Image (tube, rainbow, N blue to C red):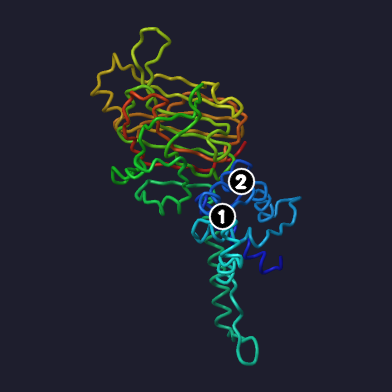
Amino acid sequence: MNELTTEVFVALFKEAYRKCFGFPLENPMSETESKHFANKIFEETGLVIGAKSIKNYSLFILDIADSKPENPSIPTLDTLARYVLSAPYTDEVKRKENEGHYPYWFEYKSKLNVAPLMSSGGIRKQKINNRTILFIILAFAAGFFLWTIFREKSAGYFADDFQSTNQDSLIQKGWLVKSVDDNWWAKRNALPSHLTLYTLRGDNWADSVNAPSIKNLLLHKIPTECFTTEIHFDNFVPLKNWQQAGLLLLEDSNIESRSVRLSLAYNDFFGGYNKPGEVLIQCITSNSNDLSKPEEIAHFPIYDKDTAKENLMMSNFRKSALKIEKNGNHFRFLYAVGPMENAAFKEVASKDLLIRPKYIGLFAFKGFVNDTTINPVYLKFFSISELPCN
């Protein structure tokens, strides 16, 4: 490819990546992400780009060490352009018969190919006086000053108070929704200034019958290696098995990757023993090699359904929150519940774990059961911020 074509290809691939995942390309793609990207392209265009090629393109575009030069074919470029431009569904045979001139690639290329300004005597030269130069210098200096002030905070901090839950707003903030259930996702704005999820059937704890599945799982990239993150709920009280909601750390955007899950949950299963149901804080970690055998790090009851008066419990759950801190390999898991916002966080567990999460998820589900009701979970606030790594 010549220099201009390479620049257009880079812009095209990045735009296609953002359309697929909802956030910009910043890290080399994993095999799982590459396969997902390839499947999305095939589903929308009817055309194929290999997952291995997609992964290599990401390495080339990000200029990763030892990456090889890439020279995608015109059909491949046309397929990417068709995906970005939402072209009609086709297949290779139909494209060869009707669109063998690859119009979508050249349409996209023409939009980015900005010709130089020409005059009758050649390239038009712009006159820049001293005042303009001084203005540019001062503007640059002011911009650099503001950038140095806010860079550290903005690069390592993200928060969302869910004032807007429309699709464009969520995508702009970097959210990605996985396994969308259109019926329930359409009800996400049930309570103003909240994002409403629902305890649908699903779990990331697999069993002999069900593969991991969480409907309307909301993912966001983790910006730093060491961080603290928290989620706040309003009036969420799980009262049926296995209603729960919380935070999910993932090494990949695929739910089957290695994970750590912290949730506010309900349990009334005790292996035949007669015990009252309990509202608890649960923390589990799953190895991607065997998702049916997670390790339970914490199982911390905070209310006993038989002994706690229901009105008291409802009052104390008006405000609840979960929090995870990661410093190197060391994790802390905390919770807070109370009738007001200022309830203090309490540590449930801390543990060293060999996991490097790249995504954080917000979820609600009821496990793989059919008789438990579907309840709303009102998310009030989410944040993730950088911690200094020791």
Q: Which of these two is toward me, 306 or 149?
A: 306
Q: Residues within 10 Å of mark 1 (few under 14, many from 20)?
A: few
Residue 301 on image: x %, y %: 40, 19
Q: Is residue 140 left or right of residue 238?
A: right
User: x, y (%) of residue 64?
Assistant: 70, 51
- The N terminus is located in which quarter? bottom right
Q: Amino acid at mark 1?
A: Asp
Q: CA distance from mark 1 to mark 2?
A: 21 Å
**Considering only vertical position in the picture, is 116 above or below 63?**
below
* Residue at x 25%, y 19% (from the top left corner): 309
Q: Secondary structure at mark 2?
A: helix
Nearest to N terminus: mark 1 or mark 2: 2
Can you tell which mark lies on residue 34?
Answer: 2
Quarter of the figure that contains the C terminus? top right
Q: Please give the count of numbered marks on the rendered protein.
A: 2
Most extreme residue toward the left, as rendered? 311
- Residue at the spot x=57%, y=48% of the render? 37
- Disc 2 crowd rating (10 Å Cα; few below 14, some 14-19, many 20+) is many
Q: Which numbered mark, 1 or 2, is in the foreground of this view?
A: 1
Q: Mark 1 highlights which residue?
A: 91
Q: x and y percent of residue 374 in the render?
A: 32, 31
What residue is rendered at 46% in x and 26% in y? Answer: 347
Q: Quadrant of residue 130?
A: bottom right
Considering only vertical position in the picture, is 303 above or below 58?
Answer: above
Q: Are marks 1 and 2 in contact (CB under 8 Å)?
A: no
Give how far across and how far down residue 342 sits, in percent: 35, 35
- Most foreground residue, 251 or 185: 185
Point out the residue furthest to the top here.
Answer: 273
- Compared with residue 148, is residue 260 higher up or lower down, i.e. above or below? above
- What residue do we see at 52% from left, 49% from top? 43
Left or right side of 232 for 33: right
Give the residue type that dot 2 points to.
Answer: Ser
